[in-house]
Image: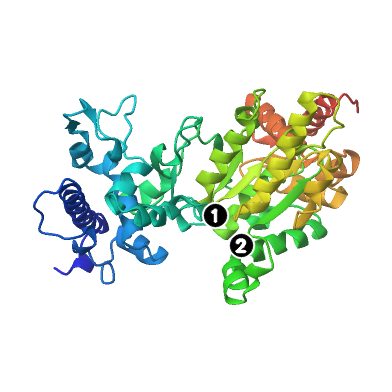
Amino acid sequence: MVKEQLDPMVVNAEFIEAELTWLTQVIEARIDLHFGQESRWQAVEEVPIPAVDDSTAAYAEFIHHYQLGTVERIAICLALAPHLRPQLLDVFQQPNERLNRGFTEFGGAHGKSHGGFLPTGETVLFVVAGNDLSMRLSAQQLFDRDHIFSRHNILKLDSPQPGEPVAAGQLALADEIVDYLTVGQLRKPDFSRDFPARLISSEMEWDELVLPAKSLEQLTELEAWVRHETVLMDDWGLSKRLRPGYKCLFYGPPGTGKTLTASLLGKRVGKDVYRISLSSVVSKYIGETEKNLERIFDRAENMSCILFFDEADALFGKRTNVSDAHDRYANQEVSYLLQRIEDYPGVVILATNYRGNIDDAFTRRFQALVHFPLPGPAEREQLWSGAFSAECDLEPALSLKQVAQDFEVSGGAIMNAVRYASLMALEADSKTIRNHDVVEGVRREVQKEGKTL
């Protein structure tokens, strides 16, 4: 059986096995050379590295795609070892008998639950460079902001304690990179403190969306960006002139279809849509909101998903006049968010009930502003006509066209009224939707807004 016919998981496991074996030999060579012990290698670069060109393993394809060199592969494999073969790094826990503690040059950290050695930036620098200062300085570029690791959120160093060397930070592979390198696919993240966002979807189809023609036209541009971004930015060379990603504002009254449209748009272009939970993001503590958002953006960058910020004015509202330290911090937070969203290479949709609540600095940078007005009579009739189950009938006295003419309500309110009228029919052991139940359902919705029919 040829390798291409094997289970992709098996193929990937075989390649990872070869990569871990290579790393083990590299570490052994470095330690032997460092302590002047006999070694079959004169330099760690002499240790044969697994070939990637003919492999169909996800790990090998990842290396080939990003054109990772020996130093990058050592860093990736070191960061992955605690997830797959933690005992491989036990060699770094040998004591320095002269000082009665570990070797400083090995770096390393210890976790709260993990009992093994967790590699740090210092560990990478030791394995790559040993005592060669010029090689060490060159290898430090792995952790620069413009390195491919940082630009694509692949691997980074956790921030060390204040005053400590940068290389003391623990190596951290992005969760989605760990998923891809090990199982060959990205697992959808669950809602958590580190990723306070929920995957949203809809059973409806794009053709069932009821919006004004102008709004649909604006959404076409967003859809076109998702479909043709790579050609536009790379093949046509516009990445030099255009900022990455696409930012869009949905604005309009509640219940007009902003969240539904985001879900259907993702479904239409084949991308997951994650709705950000603002209650889990906004913090009263200085700097925490930025950290929460940074975790979301970092995780989302490798997921190729759409981020949907509902009630976005809570995060991206107008900046205030500075009268105290709190105002200065709030304005600083907004400025940070503006920059972070501009730099995000994916699609971000912000939704608000009131366009005027969004800071002007943001609105100038949106590629599209899509208005979601209350539906007109024709749109309301379309919504009413498509809302009821095919299992039920409408009583003769019920004219959906007249209901649409008489009651100026949102699509969300219409669906709530449909729910009420349908439940009343079932409660009466009937499949007939009654006019007075529909009217009562609408009346309840209008009352929610403090109005009366």
Which of marks 2 and 1 precedes in the sequence? 2
* Quarter of the view holding residue 224: bottom right
Q: Position of residue 260 (x, y in %)?
A: 66, 45
| Local crowd size for mark 1, using a 10 Å CA cut-off: few (<14), some (14–19), many (≥20) | some
Amino acid at dot 2: Val
Q: Position of residue 219 (x, y in %)?
A: 72, 59
The furthest residue to the bottom? 236
Q: Are marks 1 and 2 in contact (CB under 8 Å)?
A: yes
**In this orientation, which residue lies closer to the viewer: 25 or 155?**
25
Name which residue lies at 59% across and 53% down.
Answer: 266
**In this orientation, which residue lies closer to the viewer: 383 or 440?**
383
Task: Give the Cα separation between the discs numbered 1 and 2.
Answer: 9 Å
Mark 1 falls on what kind of element? Answer: loop
Mark 2 falls on what kind of element? Answer: helix
Q: Label 1 belongs to which residue?
A: 271
* Quarter of the view holding residue 396: top right
Q: Position of residue 92 (x, y in %)?
A: 22, 38
